[in-house]
């Protein structure tokens, strides 16, 4: 499409920053990154963290792989989660 996809831990809506890596969100930019729209929360379970996202486009879908862990002592790096989203789901 020529659009950009960003995936990040967006804590901008929180009253105070958390030490957890959540929520994991994505958004689309159609103007080379000047603005970001179509924001979606991908993961936001309290006590869990989501990080180190890999993004790969295949045909009409995007594949996301990221660490998704639970509470300490293991922390957010204990599991790998994979997710497939059809491109239209991002809009």
Image (spheres, grey):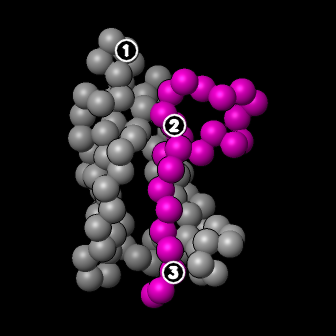
Question: To which residue does mark 1 refer?
Answer: 72
Left or right of 57 on screen, residue 87? right
Please state the extent of the stretch shown in magenta in the rendering: 1-24
Which residue does the image show at 29% across and 30% down from the upper left?
77
In the image, residue 7 lies at what x, y percent? Answer: 47, 56
In the image, residue 64 lies at what x, y percent? Answer: 32, 58
Q: Give the Cα separation between the discs numbered 3 and 2.
A: 24 Å
Query: Which secondary structure, mark 1?
Result: loop
Q: As drawn, which residue projects farthest toward the right?
A: 15
Image quarter of the C terminus: bottom right
Viewer can see residue 37: no
Question: To which residue does mark 2 refer?
Answer: 22
- As drawn, 79 above or below 60: above
Which residue is at the front of the view, 89 or 14? 14
Which residue is at the front of the view, 39 or 2? 2
In which quarter of the view is residue 31 placed?
A: bottom right
Number of numbered discs present? 3
């Amino acid at each position: 499409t020529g659009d950009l996809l960003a995936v990040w831990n967006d804590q901008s809506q929180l009253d105070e920053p958390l030490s957890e890596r959540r929520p994991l969100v994505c958004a689309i930019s159609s103007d080379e990154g000047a603005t970001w729209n179509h924001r979606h929360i991908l993961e936001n379970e309290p006590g869990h963290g989501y990080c180190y996202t890999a993004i790969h486009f295949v045909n009409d879908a995007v594949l996301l792989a990221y660490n998704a862990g639970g509470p300490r002592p293991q922390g957010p790096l204990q599991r790998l989660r994979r997710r497939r989203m059809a491109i239209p789901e991002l809009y």
